[in-house]
Image: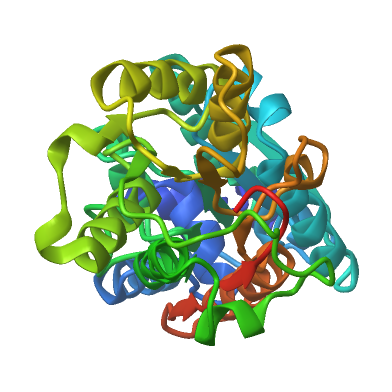
Amino acid sequence: MAESSQRRRPTIEDVARESGVSRGTVSRVLNGGHWVSPTAAEAVERAIKKTGYRINPHARNLATARANSIAFLLTEPHDRLFEDPNFSVLMRAAADALAARDLPLVLLMAGSDDEQRRATEFIMAGHVDGALLVSSHRGREGFLKTLVAAELPVVACGVPLGYERRIGYVAADDLEGARDMVAYLRDGGRGGLASESRSGSGLSSAVRGRSRIATITGPMDTSGGIGRLEGYRQELGDAFDERLVAQGDYSRASGARAMEELLDRVPDLDAVFAANDVMAAGAMDVLRERGVRVPDDVAVAGFDDAPIATRVEPALTTMHQPFERIAHEMVRMLLAVIDGEPAGRMTLPTELVVRESA
């Protein structure tokens, strides 16, 4: 009797050792089996029976409960978090959506290899139940392989290039939005699209149809950069001219550099479509410095409908992305995946916002 009472109680570590899986996998099986493959779950169940493991009800929360928090995983350098207002809009809207479920949002920066390693270790340690992935770049998504292999719930903002079939996402319709903007610039705001404006300011009297429409692209390793350039290309058709394309990285400085390049290369251009509003603002800085009037000489249009669009002079015509709805749909989708549902994929339409710049 004394020997029996002093015998050590089997632990999660014993189950993990017997089943050949990690302690975290055992915990997930005990907590409902989310993110665990059938093979691993069967191995854990067999190990539980063999070791005689029984849950200590007083320690259950520590051993098996969910973290009850969600990661906002931003794969951009720190300065982009402050320069690009879209990230703060997404983060605030996601936090609001989670607050309704009494769940906190944890910001994890993953712009460098070291940051991605630390973020992966933090996530895999069980500190969060899933991740909202923002701004995925092709060629820099290696850390996603670990998260996907662990069956951790992840939902992306925008199409996660290379993982389109394995990770759910919510995206704006970049291609059609770009096509609509180029069509608007070519038509000079007449008919169709102009009537869909969200702005009450109406069209500038200087607006006219444009024929030499340049574009400043986003990064070509992102779905937004690729989709918006493709929309621009498709809408121009046979009129597409490679000389009217300059590449940016979504920063204001890159928009300025690209605008200088375009003016030097094609001085008779009469419109510029930038793949985001921040780059459009940079382009307008250069046009102002060179004495080029907007929109009289060159019409300027952006994409996003970020706060900067109404702070520049003249106010920026742009394509509105429904960032708050995107964030809310991402949260809804991620919580569904955490509860065991398959990941979804959603593309939301953009909407033309006419202001004074075009």
How many labels sit on residues? 0
Q: Is residue 102 visible?
A: yes
Q: Quadrant of residue 246?
A: top left
Q: Position of residue 327 (x, y in %)?
A: 67, 64
Name the quadrant of the N terminus.
bottom right
- Front one among 73 and 297: 297
- Front one among 92 and 149: 92
- Front one among 63 and 320: 320
Look at 55% across and 18% down and name the residue there: 286
Q: Position of residue 314 (x, y in %)?
A: 75, 41
Look at 74% across and 66% down and name the residue there: 324
Q: Is residue 257 left or right of residue 200?
A: left
Look at 31% across and 54% down and name the residue there: 211
Q: Indicate whether 157 appears above or below 137.
A: below
Q: Position of residue 234 (x, y in %)?
A: 20, 66
Q: Is residue 35 visible?
A: no
Look at 90% across and 73% down and name the residue there: 100
Q: Is residue 8 left or right of residue 66?
A: left
Q: Indicate whether 349 appears above or below 48.
A: below
**Colour convention of the picture:** rainbow
Q: Is residue 327 left or right of residue 270?
A: right
Q: Indicate whether 332 appears above or below 282.
A: below
Q: Position of residue 179 (x, y in %)?
A: 36, 68
